[in-house]
Image (cartoon, grey):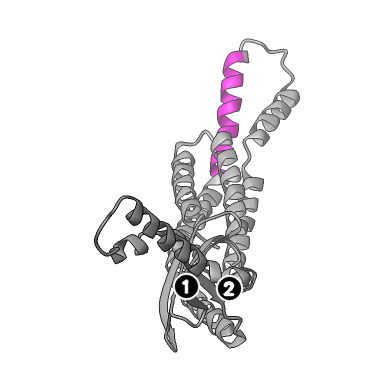
């Protein structure tokens, strides 16, 4: 199944008082790039997350976002520095006595002092919870993979349609090549004879050999044969599963190379027009292939 490199998936999972939201986004990239944006309490699972991503994706930039709420991952407790609190009130009482201050101490003064209070977070090493999180990430990865397969199918449909157009144009060039080659051979002969018509000492056999050599340089049979081979190779590769995007991109480059050679060799206007059409379709195919995994 052909897959696009663009995909998205998101799901919210619940377990006890914990709410877990997992989101995965994928975009184009030459290789597999994994970016994890997760809570600190899940850092120890990052390697496991990466293994899951590598199982389902071979190319593309994959961004994993996880947010977790609840007490199943970590336990929070409030710590009060009682020694510092006693010293604070002792010194505050001394200030009141020294300056003869009246009135009660407002609670807001105490709560404003961050030094007196500290929130401690302790991780809960629960294998069952960790497995629940890993299963949740895998579920969203499957969702993203399905979306990439759906988009990949649409992209490949367009690519294969353009491939049909390219093949049809190559077949037309193949049908025309003999006639064009013969006409080119005659044009060369006529031009040379026109320049040498007053020179009766020219060796006709040698002249014909030179004409044949020039005509041979304009022969596009080999390029057409290789183009047909590339077209068949493209179809076979497109039918494969896995990461085929880079292979298809290389084949398109080779088809582009042969097409350029045909355009450079042929002086026929009809073939030149077909070459332009082929190159246009190949360019659009290349753009689409850039998004194939």
Q: Residue at x 57, y 52 (%)?
A: 252
Q: Where does the image place residue 224, in percent across and percent down from the top left?
A: 61, 49
Depth order, front residue of 99/249: 99
| Numbered disc 1: secondary structure | helix
Give the left or right position of residue 136, taking residue 253 as reference: left
Task: Read off the magenta span.
Answer: 178-195
Query: Which picture quadrant has residue 233?
Result: bottom right
Q: Is residue 153 magenta?
A: no
Q: Is residue 181 magenta?
A: yes
166 is higher (above) or lower (below) than 72: above
The tally of labels here is: 2
Residue 112 appears in the picture as rendered: yes
Q: Where does the image place residue 213, in percent across and percent down from the top left?
A: 70, 31
Numbered mark located on residue 144 in the image: 1
Q: Residue at x 51, y 75 (%)?
A: 141
43 is higher (above) or lower (below) than 271: below
Give the left or right position of residue 227, taking residue 70 as reference: right
- Characterize the magenta stretch by its predominant secondary structure: helix
Depth order, front residue of 38/207: 38
Does the residue at mark 2 contact the one at mark 1 (Cβ under 8 Å)? yes
Give the left or right position of residue 239, taking residue 76 as reference: right
Give the left or right position of residue 220, taking residue 204 as reference: left
Q: Which residue is mark 2?
A: 56
222 is higher (above) or lower (below) than 230: above
Label 2 vs 1, first from the N-terminus? 2
């Amino acid at each position: 199944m052909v897959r696009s490199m663009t995909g998205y998936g998101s799901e919210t999972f619940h377990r006890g008082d914990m709410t877990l939201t997992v989101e995965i986004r994928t975009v184009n990239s030459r290789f597999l790039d994994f970016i994890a944006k997760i809570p600190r309490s899940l850092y120890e699972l990052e390697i496991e997350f990466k293994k899951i991503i590598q199982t389902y994706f071979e190319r593309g930039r994959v961004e994993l976002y996880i947010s977790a709420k609840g007490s199943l991952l970590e336990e929070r407790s409030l710590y009060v520095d009682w020694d510092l609190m006693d010293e604070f009130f002792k010194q505050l009482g001394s200030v009141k006595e020294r300056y003869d201050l009246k009135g009660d101490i407002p609670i807001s003064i105490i709560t404003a002092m961050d030094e007196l209070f500290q929130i401690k977070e302790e991780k809960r090493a629960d294998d069952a919870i960790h497995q629940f999180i890993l299963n949740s990430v895998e579920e969203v990865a499957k969702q993203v993979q399905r979306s990439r397969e759906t988009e990949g199918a649409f992209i490949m449909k367009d690519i294969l349609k353009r491939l049909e157009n390219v093949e049809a144009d190559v077949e037309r060039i193949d049908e025309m090549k003999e006639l064009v080659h013969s006409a080119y051979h005659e044009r060369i002969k006529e031009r040379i004879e026109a320049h040498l018509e007053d020179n009766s000492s020219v060796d006709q056999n040698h002249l014909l050999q030179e004409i044949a050599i020039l005509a041979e340089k304009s022969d596009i049979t080999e390029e057409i044969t290789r183009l047909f081979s590339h077209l068949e190779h493209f179809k076979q590769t497109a039918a494969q599963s896995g990461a085929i995007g880079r292979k298809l991109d290389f084949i398109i480059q080779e088809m582009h190379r042969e097409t350029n050679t045909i355009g450079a060799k042929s002086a026929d206007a009809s073939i030149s027009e077909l070459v332009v059409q082929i190159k246009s379709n190949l360019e659009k195919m290349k753009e689409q292939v850039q998004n194939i995994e």
